[in-house]
Structure formats: C-alpha cells, structure tokens
Image (tube, rainbow, N blue to C red):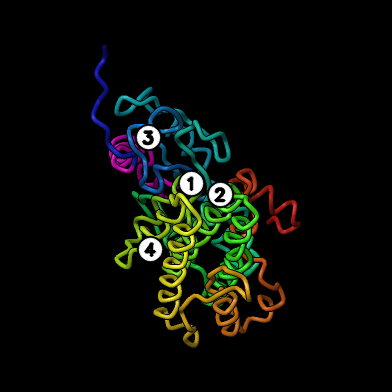
C-alpha cells in the first residue's frame, strides 16, 4: 500500500507553490497573492482529513484589469500537473472551489467573496449584510506577495467600526435575554429535550458573544468551537459551557449556565465600554428560574450607540445574528441581490 506523505498545512504548501511556480510565471507583473477565500486551510484549521477534497496548492492572484488575461495565460502554461503530490487545477474567478488557482482583479475577487468591492469603501449596510466568515476569508490566510493593493483592504476589514461593534454586542445580549428563561420553563412542563435544545442554543450564543467581546470574527459552524477555544479562557468559561450542554439534569444545567452568565457579565464590565452592570443572576419574576436578565447588558450597550442609522434598526442584529442558512452565509452576492444592495 502506498504510504501517504506527512501532512503539511496548506499555508506551508502554498508558500512553496508560490515561490516555485507562481512567482516565476508572474515575473515583474505587479500583484498580490495569498491563500484567501473559502476553506479550513485559509483559517489555518486544516488537517490531514482536509486533503480529501478541495485542498491543495490553492492561491488567489490579484492583478490589474489589463493584466488578467496575459497573466492567466502565463500561469496556466506554467502550472505542473501536481505540486507536493497534490493535483493542480486551474480556475477562473468565481468558479467552483475545486479549482486551486484564481486570477482576478481585486475588485472582482472582493465582489465574489463579499458581495461588494471593499477597496472602494465600506458602508454600514455592507458591514451588516456581510457574513463574518466571508470577511475572515479576506483578513485571515497567508499573504505571499502584496504590491500594496491588498493590505489596505485587510486593514479596513480587520474589525467592525466601534459603533457597529457596540450595536452588535447589544443585539447578541438581546438574543440571550429572549431565551434564557426557557431552559427552566421547558423543563417544568416535562420537555427535557426542549430544555436541552434551548441550552445548546444559549451556549452557542454565549460563545459568539465571547468572540464579539474579543473582537474576533466567528467562522462557520464547523469551526466555531475551535475559534472559541483559541480565545483562551482562564476564567473557566469554556468549562461552564461544556458542563451546560453535557448536564444530565436540569439542576446541573442551570448551575452551569448561571456560572457562564456571570462570567460573561464580568467580561462585559472588564471591557469598560458602558457603565458597570450588576453581574449577578437573579430569579425570573416569580418563577423558579435563575437568569442574568441579559437585556440589562443590551440596554447598556445600546445607550452608547449614537449612530442614528443603527439606532433606527432596533436590535435585529447583523446577518450572522439573524440568519442561519448556509447558502445565504456562503453566497453574499446572491443575498445582496435579494436585498437590492448589490454593487
């Protein structure tokens, strides 16, 4: 049986591929190039398991419009059948993900990735309807060459503007406030499965809140736990959330959630972006349910939002906070067309 070569990350593989194949083909053509866009490899999460599809010497090369066709021809003729034991497939901007080499202008590539050309400015609507995973595809990933066209966009997209950040924090606290009492109520009527499901939803929302508080974009579902773990949790938040979803009965479930709520409250106060909010949990009206009353934190965040446009939106949230559909979150151009905001 043929022995598989030792796994190297795509970031390392593509570094060699760029140096050995792409750079010589480009010659003196001004360009930027990197491992960008979709995929676990862009995030640095790939393992040997990732190599069974869509993985390999994948690179995005960005050039001026008049250079696209000449560069595409030169690169295509220079490509080997395989590199590092992995087949090389040549693609065009916007083609399916099995293609590994994309040649495009920065604007065209950004429109395909984000749904708009962020190099021409980023408006409030752009921020709110662009999934965080798609932004990660631009700001994360290894860059192997940059003539100055890519860095400003990555810097501009590095994190939300302050007012949008505060508003999304308020929206995330609101999501938690809307369901935190349901863990006890579903248990009370004998719906243990429902209580577990609500708990899992709250744990996911708390994880996403922790990422927001840390000014870290959330990746798609498969890697949410990995991104959360990489934040580091010396206060034990990760254990509290794990205990909540693993609890065998309601008492253990609520105890773990109470711990998690109060840790998140402490983290909020440590940010220093609002007046301090009392961090302890309390009964939900006269019911035997312990909650944080997370709306208090939402209100504190919202009180610091002065942008009239954001104030007019209520607390629905950015796209990742109200949409949970893979097609929408992975295809922002289509969603923007639906909303009538496509550029």
Residue 157 percent across, percent down from the top left: 49, 63
Q: Nearer the viewer, residue 2 or 96?
A: 2
Tag 2 secondary structure: helix
In terms of sequence position, does the residue under pointer 1 or pointer 3 come before the other? 1
Quadrant of the image containing the C terminus: bottom right
Mark whose residue sits in front, 2 or 4: 4
Q: Is residue 298 magenta?
A: no
- Residue 112's label in the rendered image is none
User: Circle 3 is placed at which residue position?
Assistant: 57
Quarter holding residue 210: bottom left
Other residues around mark 4 within 10 Å, as few (<14) / some (14–19) / many (≥20): many
- Per the model, the C-alpha gap separating discs 3 and 4 is 38 Å
- Per the model, the C-alpha gap separating discs 1 and 4 is 31 Å
Tag 1 secondary structure: loop
Is residue 231 shown to the viewer in this render? yes
- Per the model, the C-alpha gap separating discs 3 and 2 is 19 Å
- Residue 37's label in the rendered image is 1
User: Circle 4 is placed at which residue position?
Assistant: 237
Mark whose residue sits in front, 1 or 4: 4
Quarter holding residue 120: bottom right
Tag 4 secondary structure: helix
Other residues around mark 2 within 10 Å, as few (<14) / some (14–19) / many (≥20): many
Direction bottom: furthest residue:
275
Callout 3–callout 2 Cβ contact below 8 Å: no
Q: Nearer the viewer, residue 57 or 30?
A: 57
In terms of sequence position, does the residue under pointer 2 or pointer 4 come before the other? 2
Q: Is residue 33 magenta?
A: yes
Which stretch is magenta? 11-37
In terms of sequence position, does the residue under pointer 3 or pointer 4 come before the other? 3
Could you tell me which residue is drawn at 48 percent across and 52 percent down? Answer: 249
Could you tell me which residue is drawn at 49 percent across and 31 percent down? Answer: 98
């Amino acid at each position: 049986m043929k022995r598989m070569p030792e796994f190297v990350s795509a970031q390392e593989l593509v570094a060699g591929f760029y140096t050995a194949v792409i750079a010589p083909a480009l010659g003196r053509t001004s360009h930027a190039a990197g491992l960008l866009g979709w995929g676990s490899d862009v995030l640095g999460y790939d393992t040997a398991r990732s190599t069974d599809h869509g993985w390999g010497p994948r690179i995005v090369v960005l050039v001026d419009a008049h250079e696209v066709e000449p560069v595409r021809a030169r690169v295509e003729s220079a490509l080997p059948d395989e590199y590092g034991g992995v087949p090389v497939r040549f693609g065009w901007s916007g083609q399916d993900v099995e293609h590994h080499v994309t040649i495009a202008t920065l604007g065209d590539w950004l429109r395909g990735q984000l749904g708009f050309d962020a190099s021409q400015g980023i408006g409030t609507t752009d921020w709110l309807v662009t999934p965080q995973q798609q932004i990660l595809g631009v700001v994360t990933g290894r860059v192997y060459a940059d003539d100055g066209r890519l860095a400003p966009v990555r810097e501009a997209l590095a994190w939300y503007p302050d007012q949008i950040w505060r508003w999304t924090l308020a929206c995330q606290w609101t999501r938690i406030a809307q369901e935190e009492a349901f863990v006890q109520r579903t248990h009370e009527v004998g719906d243990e499965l429902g209580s577990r499901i609500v708990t899992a939803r709250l744990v996911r929302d708390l994880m996403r809140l922790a990422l927001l508080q840390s000014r870290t974009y959330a990746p798609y579902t498969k890697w949410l736990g990995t991104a959360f773990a990489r934040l580091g949790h010396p206060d034990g938040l990760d254990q509290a959330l794990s205990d909540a979803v693993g609890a065998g009965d309601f008492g253990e479930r609520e105890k773990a959630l109470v711990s998690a709520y109060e840790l998140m409250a402490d983290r909020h106060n440590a940010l220093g972006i609002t007046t301090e909010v009392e961090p302890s949990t309390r009964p939900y009206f006269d019911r035997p349910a312990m909650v944080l009353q997370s709306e208090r934190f939402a209100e504190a965040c919202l009180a610091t939002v002065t942008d009239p446009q954001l104030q007019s939106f209520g607390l629905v949230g950015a796209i990742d906070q109200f949409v949970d559909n893979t097609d929408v979150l992975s295809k922002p151009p289509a969603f923007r067309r639906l909303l009538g905001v496509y550029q």
